[in-house]
Image (spheres, rainbow, N blue to C red):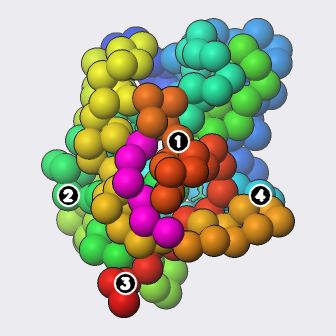
Amino acid sequence: MVAAVVARGEFEVRRFESIDSTNRYLLDEARAGAPEGVVAVADHQTAGRGRLGRVWEAPPGSALLCSVLLRPALPVERLHLAVAVVALAARDALGGRPTLKWPNDLLLGDRKLAGVLAEADLPAVVVGIGINLTWAPPGAACVGDDADREVVLDALLSSLASLYGQWPVVAERYAAECSTVGQRVRVELGDETFEGMATAVTPEGHLVVDGRTVTAGDVVHLRPA
Ligand code: BT5
């Protein structure tokens, strides 16, 4: 059940005390014809999800857990820009403190602060983000005890509204601000793992490692040998 609906600029924010997954909810809404700009925010998720069937954990009230329904009119090969625009908006909302790790993380130092998950049922794309505010699992980071979820949400939506649809700007900013570029990385694909130097992010938002373009996969930043 939706707890409250508030219009915030171009977004309609639907709030939940508890839900299985804000991404799941918006994908269902998208299939039922909901328009672009619906946002779901939850205090708690009982089945918060990451990529590839992984679990996203956050105790009630400890995180910003939200998803936004987009209909971005991007060709499939540029869909990563939908992840990039939300990651950039989150970075802006946090005063530029976190760095962007390809493909979908925000880091503080070398610890994960937030993760972005895009799920498409084209032409709809639901992009969710979990930002650790006052709690983080072992080895991860959180913003800190004074983090105010409403302030972060407002700032995120306002940055998103100004960047959304400006795809060349999004691509350029993401490439310039992605901290994976310039690092030695291990790339983990479904059936193959390799190491190399990440040298660029393409205008589609893909990572170039030793001249090879990686469109999806997990990346580990390696320390200099
Ligand atoms: C992600 O997946 O990082 C995407 C996470 C997206 C979560 C949001 S919350 C709102 C919306 N609704 C949802 O159901 N999901 C989205 P991935 O790159 O696959 O990373 C998942 C991995 O991160 C897990 O396997 C854990 O190792 C780790 N992890 C889980 N919870 C974490 C947390 N709170 N902080 C840092 N790492 C976490």
- Residue 124 percent location from the top left of the image: 69, 19
Mark 2 vs mark 3, CA separation in Å: 21 Å
Q: Are marks 1 and 4 in contact (CB under 8 Å)?
A: no
Left/right of residue 31 with respect to residue 104 in the rendered view: right
Q: Residues within 10 Å of mark 1 (few under 14, many from 20)?
A: many
Q: Is residue 55 above or below residue 12?
A: below
Left/right of residue 82 with respect to residue 76 in the rendered view: left
Q: Which residue is mark 3?
A: 223
Most common secondary structure along the magenta stretch: strand
Split into 4 quadrants, where in the image is the C terminus?
bottom left
- The mark nearer the N terminus, 4 or 3, is 4
Q: Nearer the viewer, mark 4 or mark 3?
A: 3
- Spot the residue most to the front: 211
Q: Is residue 100 visible?
A: no
Q: Which mark is residue 206?
A: 1
Q: Which residue is mark 2?
A: 97
Residue toward you, 168 or 130: 168
Mark 1 belongs to which amino acid?
A: His
Q: Which residue is mark 4?
A: 52
| Ligand 1 closer than 8 Å to label 4 CB | yes
